[in-house]
Amino acid sequence: MALDHLSDIILARKSAQKNQAAFAALVRRHNATVRAVSRRLTRGAVEADDIAQTAFLTAWRKIGTYSGGSFKSWIGMIVYREFLQYCRKRRLEVPFEEGRNTDVSDNTFLNAGHKLDLDAALNYLSEPQRICVILCVATGFTHKEAALATGWPLGTVKSHVNRGITKLRHYLTVDDVA
Amino acid sequence: MTSDDENPMAADAENFEDLSALFAAQDARFTEDSKASEGFVRSVMYSVRENDRRRRSILGGFGMLGGLIAGAQFPSFLALFGKALPSPMETLSPSVTQVSVDNVVIWSAVIMFAIVMGFISLAEAN
């Protein structure tokens, strides 16, 4: 693949000139992240790959608007919008406030002190924390970008991320001590 | 100015670099399965080609339709200018306007053009 060594911005510029080979190189480079983010946002729904595919198609149409910076964040923003469309279609709500916490004290598995893997641990966070952690920690959004994508205040995003990572670290390190 | 202000992205990330690395390692598992990864890339590129083909056919189809309508109108326009050219300039503009206002085909073409432009804008916006 002759184009694979080029930087994201150069590939994006070539793609904007309708160079499909350049765009294919971008898809090859970022498909793992995009699919993983989509899978995490949808909690592993079967539609995760469809969302990832639609996101790449939207990226192809709008590649001219990418003006540098992290391509991962740029496409991550598109994936998040596609995820919101998916939620709207299924009338799923993305709650803004913490209130629907998955209360860890209710969970016998965690109380038994078992370690969780990353995805399982993510599912124990409240929905806003889960989304903020996926966007900022897994996808590489800045807090500002996450605030822009979710429409939540910057301070709220920061607080969700901080609480989320604290809980995540706890769930990943809990051991058989109970 | 704090170091956070200087580089907000680094400040955001420094709290959770370890977790980001964990996520990245998990993401990499997708690429390890090169068959699935190649299948996904092929599927995306197929959609991209299909999308471009559909867009080209729509634009080409409407373009040809517009061309046909314009072509059908061309002789009458020539006839109009043939009549209008010898007449004084002050009568030219009203006569051209009158012909356009009365001509259903011209109005249809204008409306069709507006619909097509609207449709294309909508398609491009999505």
Image (tube, rainbow, N blue to C red):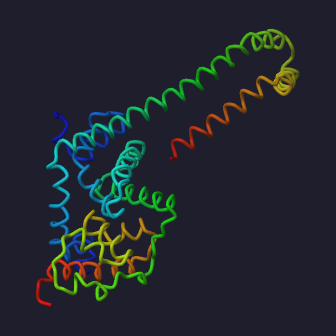
- Quadrant of res B63: top right
Percent across and percent down for residue B65 are 63, 21
Q: Is residue B89 left or right of residue A115?
A: right
Quarter in which the C terminus of chain A is drawn: bottom left
In front of the other: B58 or A8: B58
Left or right: where A2 falls relative to A81: left
Q: Residue at x 22, y 87 (%)?
A: A111
Where residue B58 appears, x then y in whole percent? Answer: 54, 29
Which residue is pictured at 77% across the width and 23% down the height?
Answer: B105
Q: Quadrant of the N terminus of chain A?
A: top left
Q: Is residue B93 above or below residue B46?
A: above
- Horizontal side of B59 relative to A50 (left or right) equals right
x then y, percent, for residue A4:
18, 40
Residue A61 picture quarter: top left
- Vertical arrangement, residue B24 with respect to residue B35, above or below: below
Expressed as whole percent of the image width and height from the top left, the position of residue A42 reads: 36, 62
* Nearer to the camera, A145 or A134: A134
Residue displayed at 72% across by 33% down = B111
Residue lying at the far left of the rendered structure: A176
**Measured along the vertical axis of the image, is residue B38 above or below residue A91?**
above
Q: Is A159 located above or below residue B115 in the figure?
A: below
In the image shown, does A73 or A165 lie closer to the viewer?
Answer: A165
Marks counted in the figure total 0
